[in-house]
Every structure is written in structure tokens, then in C-alpha cells.
Image (tube, rainbow, N blue to C red):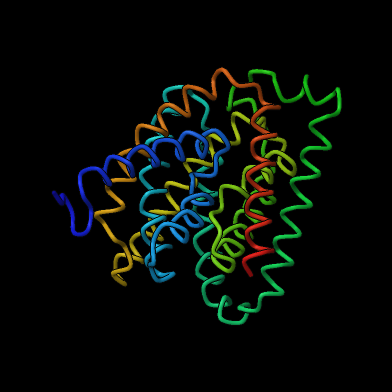
Amino acid sequence: MEIFSGITLLSALLYVVIGFAVAVFGTLIGAGGGIIFVPLFLWMFDWPPTAIAGTSLAIVLLNAISASLAFKKQKKIKFDAAIPFAAATIPGSILGAMWSNWFTGSSFRTAFGLLLLFISLVIIWKNTRKSAAAKYDVDVDPKDVKVNMPLGLCISFGIGFISSTFGIGGGVIQVPAMIGFLGFPPHIATATSQFVLAISSLIGVASHQWEQHILWGYAICFGIGAIFGAQEGAKISKKVKGRSILFLLAGALMLVALRLIFLS
């Protein structure tokens, strides 16, 4: 029995479970799950790239909205930084989409993959120092986090540009940037990143829908799992130490880096 075009009930249940699992991990590291959904769809389905990008982003949007609501209840989101950061990603994304026609060579993807690999190794190195435990595992109120707003806006613009140019979700770049350059504690960085991702991905979903790139039957099935997975991921994050989040983030960066390097 098909509940959507080409989707049986058994397949739909499988997609819900997968969406749940991906969202739990994506919410923990603040990446939204897009870095997993895209290669997963490449492996599972024979879809054109536009359908993969559009459908993945629709799921990421549902994930990010659900996670943002959960983190809002936990009072982990620094809204006075999240809103301007999200706004700054929009022009960067537009410019990146325009420039992406110039950066289509595999050498650029390989170079960016090496950059992400380097960032992941730096995170692991910094995270293994004894001083990291005290810095990253302290429970901090978002209101007490001081932000260099000009630097944060520039970083967000750059993240929007890089994400759009290379086709990678911004959360996996934004979280380490917020931690490394802006001094955000990991828990505040992941929560704030989810809110930024919710706003920025909404713009992307609208654009993909206009171009009819989204396969909504699949997006709904995976998205239902992602909605509940994001809630569970937010709950788990309360029990996970900041250093553990950084190790998970480094692992995710390595996966993206290897995907870029070897699938270029």
C-alpha cells in the first residue's frame, strides 16, 4: 500500500526511523542533519542533485524548528546574536549561489574538504588539553555570553557564502566558528546555531519550492522522524558534556571533509 507516490507504508516507517536517528545526532552538534541526509540520499535514491538538495533542506528546516523550540525551553539560545547572524547569512547565500557557477571544479571541493579536515583536527587538539574541561563544561547563561557582533556578522556572511558555494549546511561550519572565534560555550553555540539554521533554511526551502525541487512525500516521512529526533537530541544535549559535543562535531567535520575529498 502506497501512502505517497512511490512510498509504501513499510518504506515510510523506515524513513521515519532514519529521520529520527539523523536528527538526534544533528541536533547534538548543531548541524541540522543535512551533512548526513545529502550523502544518504545519494546512496539510497537515484534523484537529480536539485531534488536531493531541496528535499534535504526541507527536512533540515523541520529539524531546526523543532530543535529551536526545545532549546528555547531550555533557555540556551542567545537570540540577540542569533537573529542578526541569521540575517547576515542571507546575502552571503545569494552571493555564494551566484559564484558557485565559477567554483565547480573538483579542486575547490578538495581544498575545502582539506580545510574542514584541518578544522576538525584543531578542535580535537584543543579539546584534549586539560584546560578545555573547565572552559567548555561550565553551565553558562546565554545573556552572559559576550559577542563581537561585527566579527560575528562577517563570519555569518562568510558561512552563508561558503554553504551556498559548496552545497554544505552552515551549521557544521557555524558551530566551530562560534566556539573558536566568538567564544561561545558548546551548548550555547549548538542551540543558537539551530535557530540560525531554522531561519536561513526557510529562505532556501522557499527558493527550492519555487523551482519545484522538493519531493514532499519523502520530506514529510523523514521530517516526521526529524521533528521527534530533534526533541530527543535537545534532551540528550543537557546530559552531554561540552567536550563530548566538540568531539562529535569534529567527527562530523571529518565525514564531510572525506565526502568532499573523495567524491569530488
Q: Position of residue 223 (x, y in %)?
A: 33, 44
Decide which of 173, 23 is in the foreground and name it: 23
* Image position of 40 (left or right of 5): right
* Residue at 33 percent of width and 67 percent of height: 213
Looking at the picture, does residue 243 appear above or below residue 23? above
Looking at the image, is 80 positioned above or below residue 242? below
| Residue 10, position as x, y percentages in the image | 24, 43
Question: Residue 164 vs residue 228: left or right?
Answer: right
Q: Position of residue 122 (x, y in %)?
A: 81, 44
Image quadrant holding the C terminus, namely bottom right
Position of residue 23 relative to residue 254, above or below, is above
Q: Position of residue 93 (x, y in %)?
A: 52, 65
Q: Is residue 233 left or right of residue 6?
A: right
Relative to residue 12, is residue 258 depicted above or below? below
Residue in view at x 76 percent, y 24 percent: 135
Image quadrant where residue 31 sits: top right
